Image (cartoon, rainbow, N blue to C red):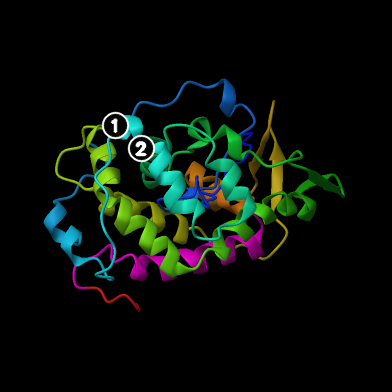
Amino acid sequence: MPNYQRIVWIGLAVAAIAILALGYFLFLDPAAEKKSPPVPDTTALARPPAQDSADASEAPDPNIVPLDLDLDQSDGAVRALIAGRGIPAAMKEWLQHEDIVRTVVIAVDLIARGESPAAQLPFLAPAGKFSVLQRDGKSFMAPLSFRRYDALVDAFTAVPDSTWVTWYWTLRPTLEKAFAELGYPGITFAQRIRQAIEQLTRAPLVEKTVQLEKKVLSYAFADIALEALNPVQKHLLRFGPANAARVQKKLRTLFGALRLERGKSTNQ
C-alpha cells in the first residue's frame, strides 16, 4: 500500500464543484506535493458518448442556466456559484485555489482511471499521519487514522444532492470544455464522472481490522485481494469502513440525481 496522504473532497468532497467526485477528490499522498502532475492517457476508458450520457438540454431543473465560461477567467464565477449555496466552511477555503474547473476535471479523470489525484489536490491533504497498531508482532491499520478523513467526508455528505445537481448542470458546458482539452476521443466528462463514481463504489468495505505488511518505506495490505485493488480504491479503505460507507452511499444517490446515464430517472 503506497505511502499516500489524502486529498479532499473530493472532498470528494472535491474542490467543491463538479463532483466527485467525486471523488472523488478523496485521495492524497504525503509525497504528492513533490510529484509532477500526471499526463492523462488519451485512450483509456473511452466510450461512444451517445451510449450513456444525457444531453445538456436534459437538465432536471428548467431554471438552471448553463454557463459556458472562459476557462482562464472562470474562477470568479465558480466561486460565486458555489459560495452562494451555504456550503461547509472547508469548501470556502478550497475554493481560494486557482484554475478550479481544470483541477476538478483532471482529478475526476484520474479517479476514473483508478489513479490517485494527489498531485492535483495538495491542499486537501488531511492533518496528521497514517498510524499503525502493533499487535502480537503484526501490523494493523489504526482506527485513529480514519478520523483524519472525518472533516472531508462530513463536508462532502453535508451538501444536498440538489445543490450538487445545480452546480454540475450549471457548469457542465465549462466542465466539458475543460475535459475536451485532455484530448480523449469519443467520450464526455459526464461519462468520466460516471466512471469515477464506479471506481469508488466498487471498492470493498472491510469491517474487520486490516492487517498490513511492512515494506521498506511504507506498508502494503497483507490480504492479496486488497493489495490488488487500484490506488484510488485502496486509499478509500484508509478512510475506514464508516467513512467509506458514507462516501459510497452519497455517490450512489448522486449517480442518479446527476442523470449521468441516458434514460435514468433522477430518483434512481
The boundaries of the magenta stretch are 239-263
Tell me where residue 228 appears, x and y as whole percent.
50, 46
Secondary structure under the numbered disc 1 in the rendered image: loop
Q: Nearer the viewer, residue 77 or 151?
A: 77
For disc 1, the marked residue is 41
For disc 2, the marked residue is 74
Tell me where residue 108 appears, x and y as whole percent.
39, 45
Membership of 256 in magenta stretch: yes
Membership of 252 in magenta stretch: yes
Secondary structure under the numbered disc 2 in the rendered image: loop
Image height of 200 relative to 183, above or below: below
Q: Residue at x 28, y 41 (%)?
A: 69
Label pair 2/1, CB-CB below 8 angstroms: no
Mark 2 to mark 1: distance in Å?
25 Å
Q: What residue type is disc 2 on? A: Ser
Q: Nearer the viewer, residue 218 or 72?
A: 72
Q: Judge left or right: residue 194 versus residue 244.
A: left
Q: Residue at x 60, y 42 (%)?
A: 93
Dominant secondary structure (helix, strand or loop) of the stretch shown in magenta: helix
